[in-house]
Amino acid sequence: MPRPRFSYPLPLIIALSLGLSACSTDKAAFYHQEEFSDTNAFSRSFPGTEKAVCEAARRALLGQGYVISKTTETTMDGNKSFQPASDKHMEIAFHVVCASNGNGKSSTMFVSATQDGFALKKSNTSASLGVGVLGSVSMPFGSSDDSLVRVSSETIRSPDFYDRFFGAAERYLLVDTDEDDQAPPKK
């Protein structure tokens, strides 16, 4: 007994194949951006212990008005808020990890920062009054609840941004080194 052949219109086949290829392309695009190359903007080596390097990073963030929310000897998180418009809010969050290079003389500071955008969303509520004989009556008086809703979140990828941060951290590290050199010898 012969099998029945199904034939689909050519436009339907083309539309389905384009739709499937578009879905797979969007998901694959993000991991293709990750280079894992030698010239990484997210890390820098400094002379000093991991504790001293992280202290320089902490001072660099504090010096620019960041609030340090979590810290250990070798890690820290800090953030700073901005309000570019009355209904918009931006926040930059830093995550810093300091690791020894294993030689006892230098450490690497790994930094990533994200920029989150928030928008003010209003939700109106109205009051209704239930009266036994008349039923329910909606009244025009009500209230409006405002809340900030995250509308965007992105890792900052600008090498210039990180260069400025590493430069500030290096200035604080040099100050600590100079102070150590000028300190009187311990007896």
Image (cartoon, helix red, strand yellow):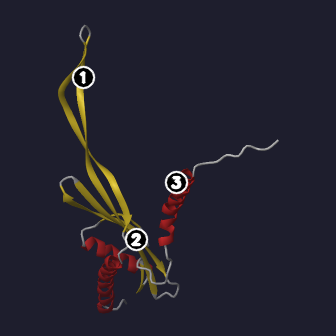
Residue picked out by circle 1: 128
Q: Position of residue 20 (x, y in %)?
A: 54, 56
Q: Secondary structure at mark 3?
A: helix
Amino acid beneath label 2: Ser
Give above or below for 51 relative to 115: below
Q: Residue at x 25, y 7 (%)?
A: 133
Mark 2 vs 3: CB contact within 8 A: no
Q: Position of residue 102 (x, y in %)?
A: 53, 84
Q: Position of residue 54 (x, y in %)?
A: 39, 76
How far apart marks 3 and 1 lie (CA) works out to 49 Å
How far apart marks 2 and 3 lie (CA) works out to 40 Å
187 and 51: which one is in front?
A: 51
Residue 97 falls in image quadrant = bottom left
Could you tell which of marks 2 and 3 lies nearer the N-terminus? 3
Q: Residue at x 49, y 73 (%)?
A: 34
Could you tell which of marks 2 and 1 lies nearer the N-terminus? 2
